[in-house]
Amino acid sequence: MPRMSCRWLILFLASGACHRSSEQGQSAPATDSNLASNACSPLSSSRSQTPTGLLQLCRGDPQNPLGAARTFYDEGQYSDALACAARACAFSPDDPQAHSERAAALAALGQLEDAQLAYSRALAINPDHLDALLGAAHLYAVRLPSSRERDELAVAYSERGLALAQLQRDQEMAGAFALLSAMAFNDLGESPQALDRAEQVLHVEPDNGDARYERAMALFELCRFSEARRAFSSLLSDPDRRAHANHQLGLLYEREGNFRQADTYFARARQLAPEDFHESSLPSADAFRSEIDKALAELPADMLRDLRGIPVVAEDIPAEKDLLSVEPPLSPTILGLFRGPPLGEPCTTSDGPCRSVALYRRNLARAARDRDELAKQIRLTLLHEIGHLRGEDDLELAARGLE
């Protein structure tokens, strides 16, 4: 069984509450599927090559380049680690550990596309190689920008590794895989699974800051707001996680209508992590309604026809009864919501329209940096909800770029 080198212990200790951002921007806005956002900058993309574009020679033991690669990596000498791992791959092209060591060095140097290929090669040789599974899971769950496909790959690798580590009674590796699963499940909006994996880590490591944060996020997404507030409050003194904890507490106070207290927490989050949180410009109710009407007027004729008689309403934030109308609950950060059955299904009610679309002013404003971006996000959210009106589910909409 491959050893769990100290690189992974260092990796997890150093990761803190760093969370990556989505390819679309800082907030990875959700519509009516549960999505959590991350924001963590990758390591420097410094190259490990000489000015001629060639790898330097391995400076370690020429008879044991794999051991040299491990030593150099653990010492933080990633260029040397890469050179020796490449030599090990040349000597033993069918050794998954050699390719995993090369992938780890590439990832540390910011060469993430090459790292993806190296991990893929290691796992093609041995799909059960724990070191490669852990490295690949971390690459997709933390280092690369968030997307549904990457998050799904992270889950696939981490869950496979978790099952194998448990079979081998490797508690340390199992904890590392469970933590990555919690992160990826939260990113996918699969909060019950994220909560389970985070609590699995905390059962063994009650002070694990990353697991505490993922648990808090899962509780928030599951609309267990009192528990989430306690969980985030306990992270306010954590230097690696306090910015995100302040932001989440702002969201919780906003839900209560305590906007002054919410603004205090939001401002503190921006001060602590200006690269992750921007000051949103909240449009007035009239201005927001005007943007919605403009987006409606620009819809194609077939969509306007489908929306005939269906109110499109502006609301501040999602009501708790709407969030709890499905199991598991919808995310409190959804940007919009389609209520009612899709077209073609029976639709009757004695209390107003049985179908409606809601767009949420505060959540949408947070997802945009300026008025132009807000207009684009309103249109995207409206198209997403029309997709639900027409019977599409979240996976179908994500496949069309309407996540």
Image (cartoon, grey):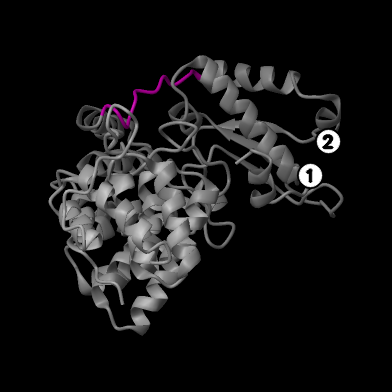
Q: Is residue 135 magenta?
A: no
Residue 31, given in percent of the width and then of the height, sits at 57, 41
Q: Position of residue 346 (x, y in %)?
A: 85, 54
Residue 159 lies in quadrant: bottom left
Say which of 70 and 83 sits in front. 83
Residue on which the image places disc 1: 390
Residue 230 placement, left or right of 159: left
Give the magenta range.
274-284
Residue at position x 23%, y 38% in the image: 243
Three-letter amino acid code of the residue under disc 1:
Arg
Question: Answer yes or no: do the residues labelled 2 and 1 have beta carbons within 8 Å?
Answer: yes
Question: Which numbered marker is on residue 306?
Answer: 2
Q: Residue at x 45, y 31 (%)?
A: 25
Q: Earlier in the sequence, mark 2 or mark 1?
A: 2
Q: Nearer the viewer, residue 213 or 89?
A: 89
Q: State yes or no: residue 280 in magenta.
A: yes
Regarding residue 94, the answer to whether it shows in the image is yes
The rendered magenta stretch, by its main secondary structure, is classed as loop
Q: Is residue 311 above or below residue 128?
A: above
Position of residue 376 relative to residue 158, above or below, is: above
User: In this view of the protein, which residue sits in the foreground, 106 or 298?
Assistant: 106
In the drawing, does residue 403 fall left or right of residue 369? right
The answer, for residue 223, to whether it is visible in the render is: no
- For the residues labelled 2 and 1, the Cα–Cα distance comes to 8 Å
Q: Residue at x 81, y 31 (%)?
A: 303
Q: Nearer the viewer, residue 60 or 305?
A: 60
